[in-house]
Image (tube, rainbow, N blue to C red):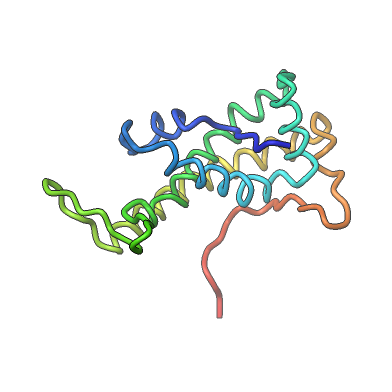
């Protein structure tokens, strides 16, 4: 099955600080990664695949459409941005790895990028918490949510990562 994206690049540009001129090819890998890693982690394999099938078959309606539009897409936008930010200034070419430096702009520090990443993580976690609550209260509407087995990804029902406790 071809990769099905739950958001469009335009959604990412309209809902974040991304400039409208950022190259689509630079953003797509991070949307794919965020969707496969973060979103599938909270949906579980069966519900994730059911949504892919519904989107591909143009049958995404009703409760599934509500789930995607109101919960998954806002979270995915911020997870994708969170994953993209650390790599935004870099390019890999035949001659090596380069950091883009603009003539009329100032590069940000690692601490500033980390701050932006953490803010995006906070936004994504807010929407994921809402999604988990929605799925928990309405799990009868999404039978795939609890049908994972064997090597499937089981839905993570706790989105909070507060760091390591030693």
Residue drawn at (12%, 49%) of the image: 103
Q: Quadrant of the C terminus?
A: bottom right
Quadrant of the rendered image containing residue 164: bottom right
User: Is residue 81 or residue 58 the one in the foreground?
Assistant: 58
Q: Is residue 3 left or right of residue 137?
A: left
Pinpoint residue 87: horizontal percent, then vertical percent. 39, 55
Image coordinates of residue 64 in percent, x first then y, are 72, 26
Q: Which residue is at a point 83% across and 32% down the rendered structure image? A: 140
- Where residue 107 sits, quadrant-wise, is bottom left
Q: Residue 38 versus residue 143: which sits nearer the camera?
A: 38
Up/down of 149 relative to 51, above or below: below
User: Residue 153's x, y, as percent?
Assistant: 76, 53
Q: Residue at x 72, y 23 (%)?
A: 63
Q: Is residue 164 above or below residue 166?
A: above
Nearest the camera: 112 or 27? 27
Q: How many marks?
A: 0
The single residue placed furthest to the left in the displayed view is 104
Residue pushed farthest front?
94
Residue 45, compared with residue 66, is above or below; it is: below
46 sits to left or right of 67: right
Which quadrant is the N terminus positioned in? top right
Relative to the observer, which residue lies in front, 131 or 120?
Answer: 120
Q: Residue 26 in the image: x percent, y percent?
A: 42, 44
């Amino acid at each position: 099955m071809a990769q099905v994206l739950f958001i469009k690049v335009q959604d990412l540009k309209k809902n974040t600080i991304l400039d409208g001129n950022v190259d689509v090819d630079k953003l797509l890998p991070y949307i794919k990664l965020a969707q496969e890693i973060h979103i599938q982690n909270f949906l579980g394999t069966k519900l994730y695949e059911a949504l892919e099938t519904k989107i591909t078959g143009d049958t995404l309606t009703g409760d599934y459409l509500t789930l995607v539009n109101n919960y998954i897409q806002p979270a995915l936008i911020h997870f994708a941005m969170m994953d993209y930010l650390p790599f935004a200034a870099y390019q890999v070419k035949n001659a090596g790895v380069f950091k883009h430096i603009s003539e009329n702009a100032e590069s940000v520090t690692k601490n500033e990028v980390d701050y932006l990443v953490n803010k995006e993580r906070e936004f994504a976690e807010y929407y994921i918490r809402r999604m988990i609550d929605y799925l928990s209260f309405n799990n009868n509407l999404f039978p795939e949510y609890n049908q994972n087995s064997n090597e499937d990804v089981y839905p993570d029902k706790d989105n909070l990562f507060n760091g390591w406790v030693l």
